[in-house]
Image (cartoon, grey):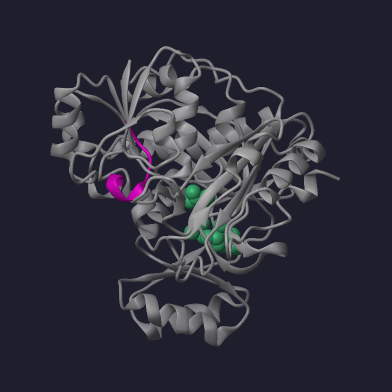
Amino acid sequence: MRILVIGSGAREHAIVDSLLTSGEHEVVVSPGNAGIAQAVTCVEFGDVTDGDAVSQYALDNAIDLIVVGPEAPLIEGVADAPRERGIAVFGPSRAAAQLEGSKAFAKRIMAEAGVPTGRAVRAGTLAEARTAIVELGAPHVIKADGLAAGKGVIVTSDEQAAIAHAEHWLQHGSVLVEEFLSGEEVSLFFLSDGHDVVPLSPAQDYKRLLDGDEGPNTGGMGSYSPLPWLADRFGDERTFVRRVLDEVALPVVRQLESEGTPFIGLLYCGLIVDGDRINVIEFNARFGDPETQVVLPRLVTPLGELLFAAASGKLGDAAWPEFSERTAVSVVLASEGYPEAPIVGRPLGGLESALEVGGVHIDHAATAWSESRDVLVATGGRVLSVVAVGDGFADTRSRAYEAVSRIHFEGGQHRTDIAEKVAR
Ligand code: AMP
Ligand code: GLY
């Protein structure tokens, strides 16, 4: 197949690498980044949120499948025009992407579908928010209703901070005041063809900036997969995955189908697991970043065929994708100042040396070549995902960190405790 991948992050780099492993596909990426361009052709054809431009490119270049990586173009509706023109697209319509684009929409769908989630009150004014904050009690969870690039959520025991967060985000729309859920976070992805779903393998993301889950929320600072502790609670991973499929993913997909807005693409279930209780904290409408960087290297079933089956309504007969038993750990290297105000333009060195560590590869997130084309520079907040794949978390994790230690990047930030709890 000829596959067009839209996006420019480490997630898209991981998707591209996984698509290439079968050796059967030609992949182009728009816009891509310096790391992705080492593997495949990167093209620019204007605005990647413009469905007509994407359709035209796909038709002109005999593209068989479009895979949309990030949420912003999906929520803008980039999948709609090519799908209407008969091109296979992996990524939901504008209407179905509301599952990520509006937390209030997601809550309504969950209520209709009977999916377990925290109680939430929607507030449109500060007075309503205040009442809900007091009523639901501490710890407080306040969420901006719309997309907020990871900055819309606060979890705090400080009532004044909760009210201030609500006041800020009320300028941009309504907010949700949500019941606090305690437990372990799990990200579990499902491929959906609008009617049927198949699961990928669970991963855990580290959302806070600093070690020990301190500091502000980020897009994600590292991840690991699989989650060995799931077996202790559920007997085995498959039993857990089956429950999420039956209690969460399938009911949501069927609800969206019944409303005439079928969800075709990746349903990201962000879960809190407390004992053997499973609650949803959020949905995303695309692959997670940095979870994808640890899930896809373990995928044995060819990714291209799976995404094409989902995009063309043919998942019904598909078996669950197969995953290796290998362990994968990713550590994100971010710019100084991330997440508030990342300093960009600084050079990156030592990547060749990092890549000499066995089992290590690097997914580029925000990199470009300098004008003289001899220096790799950082162009954003999250810059690289350093990924190790191996046997056993202790060894895999130490390889990931050995590689990180070989990279030179002034002011670079990373967590030092990724996968520590499973490496003991
Ligand atoms: P979200 O954007 O909804 O994923 O929220 C960002 C992060 O805030 C999550 O990954 C959790 O760590 C935390 N969080 C969100 N909702 C809750 C909740 N109801 N209870 C506890 N923590 C939450
Ligand atoms: N890692 C969290 C996300 O992709 O939203």
Residue 227 sits in which quadrant?
top right
Residue 307 sits in which quadrant?
top left
Q: 313 or 137, which lies in front?
A: 313
Magenta stretch contains residue 68: yes
Q: Residue at x 38, y 54 (%)?
A: 108
Q: 232 or 356, which lies in front?
A: 356
- Identify whether 254 is placed above or below 339: above
- Identify whether 232 is placed above or below 336: above
Quarter occupied by the C terminus: top right
Horizontal relation, residue 129 to residue 336: left or right = left
Bounds of the magenta span?
Answer: 67-74
**Residue 136: x and y, percent?**
56, 75
Magenta stretch contains residue 221: no
Q: Quadrant of ligand 1?
A: bottom right
Quarter occupied by the N terminus: top left
**Residue 25: x and y, percent?**
38, 16
Q: Residue at x 43, y 47 (%)?
A: 284
Q: Residue at x 67, y 34 (%)?
A: 356
Taking the image as drawn, is residue 282 in sight?
no
**Residue 343: x and y, percent?**
46, 67
